[in-house]
Image (tube, rainbow, N blue to C red):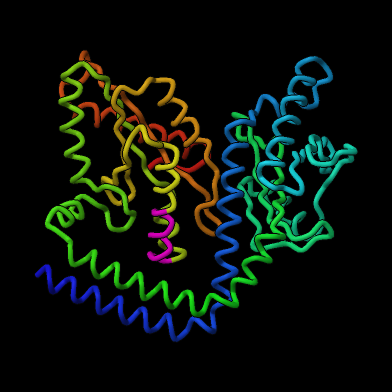
């Protein structure tokens, strides 16, 4: 059975190699361009993550303060923007706010040495207004050609604890060199891509030939849709957590329930619904970080277990997840309900009791979200 599976996988891979090799000449430019965009997005997302960690709501709210608090906030933000602009190779990096009359103005600008205000125009202005209107991060659809050169933009909205937008961070990345380099590389990519595909096929075949039984066992614990661990792996982790709890370690569990999956399935189809679920899982995993693993325990339910993780750290993860507004699919942003519980020997007798409490908290959170949106409880 194992050899038959390997043979079938290799045949499929070989056919794929032939098809890609035959069509690579016609799509060489598109591949180069996509590679360019992926490289830019990775760099842009890295800078965005730093800004999200370093830039606080309190600082942005204090920008307009004429007192000492405002001066400190402006100085701190200017220093941060100046450093990030150089490290991230940005042409412009700024904060845009809306005045009482609804007009845009650049409240903090860490890019121009002369201190002149800068507000984007053209297609970039459209992205900025969309970020304000939809209250989601907007990444440019491609590279914009401006009077300052080729740029790739990200507009990231900042909201206070009341979900009121108080400003937008604008990032315009300098992509002149990267864009030109990949255009030159397109000329050589035909032969190179063919050689790499053949090499990859050989390596993959050899790797599959050496596949052993533990690989298939590992596959049994994986959720094939999302790539994260499944319910079977969660049950095993639950038993391990129970043993660690008996040794005096704290155990905290968070249950997640993805919102709007049925709506996505009904309106866009199940294929897009699968993509929506996978993208939600990726965002959850990013917020959980190395402290825990993400498990898919049901259709649209996920869970994670923390061992000896401090409560403030857990609360920070919950806060970040509940305030996440990243767009994960066209017209849909990240949205889920979550509930957390820490094992308490005076309340919980087993790990199942802990699971039940976390699950109950998750449903309470879902009710709160529906209530805030004026939706009927079901």
The percent position of residue 246, horizontal first and vertical second, equals: 16, 19
The answer to whether residue 201 is above or below residue 353 is below
The percent position of residue 365, horizontal first and vertical second, equals: 41, 33
Q: Is residue 229 within the magenta segment?
A: no
Quadrant of residue 175 within the rendered picture: bottom right
- Give the residue at x 39% y 66%: 271
Q: Is residue 340 left or right of residue 147?
A: left
The answer to whether residue 245 is above or below residue 95 is above
- Give the residue at x 64% y 49%: 134
Image quarter of the C terminus: top left
- Give the residue at x 46% y 64%: 267
Write the start and end of the magenta stretch as one range.
Answer: 269-278
Q: Nearer the viewer, residue 113 or 324?
A: 113
Quadrant of residue 144 within the rendered picture: bottom right
The percent position of residue 329, horizontal first and vertical second, equals: 51, 57
Q: How many marks?
A: 0
Quadrant of residue 127 within the rendered picture: bottom right
């Amino acid at each position: 059975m194992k050899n038959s599976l390997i043979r079938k996988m290799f045949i499929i891979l070989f056919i794929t190699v032939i098809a890609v090799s035959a069509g690579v000449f016609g799509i060489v430019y598109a591949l180069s361009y996509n590679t360019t965009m992926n490289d830019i997005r990775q760099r842009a997302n890295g800078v965005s993550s730093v800004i999200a960690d370093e830039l606080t709501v309190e600082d942005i709210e204090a920008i307009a303060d004429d007192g000492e608090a405002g001066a400190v906030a402006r100085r701190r933000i200017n220093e941060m923007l100046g450093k990030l602009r150089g490290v991230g190779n940005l042409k412009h990096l700024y904060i845009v706010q809306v005045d009482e009359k609804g007009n845009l103005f650049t409240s903090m600008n860490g890019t121009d040495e002369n201190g002149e205000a800068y507000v984007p125009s053209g297609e970039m202005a459209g992205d900025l207004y969309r970020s304000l209107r939809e209250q989601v991060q907007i990444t440019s659809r491609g590279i914009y050609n401006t009077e300052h050169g080729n740029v790739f933009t990200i507009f990231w909205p900042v909201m206070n604890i009341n979900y009121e937008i108080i400003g937008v961070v604008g990032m315009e990345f300098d992509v002149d060199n990267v864009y030109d380099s990949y255009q030159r590389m397109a000329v050589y990519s035909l032969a190179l891509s063919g050689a790499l595909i053949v090499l990859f096929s050989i390596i993959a075949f050899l790797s599959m030939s050496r596949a052993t039984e533990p690989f298939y066992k590992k596959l049994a614990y994986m959720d094939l849709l999302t790539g994260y661990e499944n319910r079977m792996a969660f049950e095993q982790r639950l038993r391990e957590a129970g043993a660690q709890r008996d040794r005096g370690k704290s155990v905290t569990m968070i249950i997640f329930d993805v919102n709007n999956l049925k709506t996505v399935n009904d309106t866009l189809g199940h294929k897009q619904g699968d993509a929506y679920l996978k993208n939600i899982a990726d965002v959850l995993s990013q917020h959980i970080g190395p402290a825990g693993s993400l498990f898919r325990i049901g259709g649209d339910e996920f869970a994670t277990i923390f061992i000896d993780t401090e409560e403030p750290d857990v609360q920070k993860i919950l806060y970040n997840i509940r305030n996440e507004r990243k767009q994960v699919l066209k017209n849909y942003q990240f949205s889920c309900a979550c509930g957390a519980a820490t094992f308490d020997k005076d309340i919980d007798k087993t790990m199942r009791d802990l699971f039940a409490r976390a699950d109950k908290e998750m449903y309470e959170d879902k009710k709160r979200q529906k209530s805030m949106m004026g939706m009927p409880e079901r």
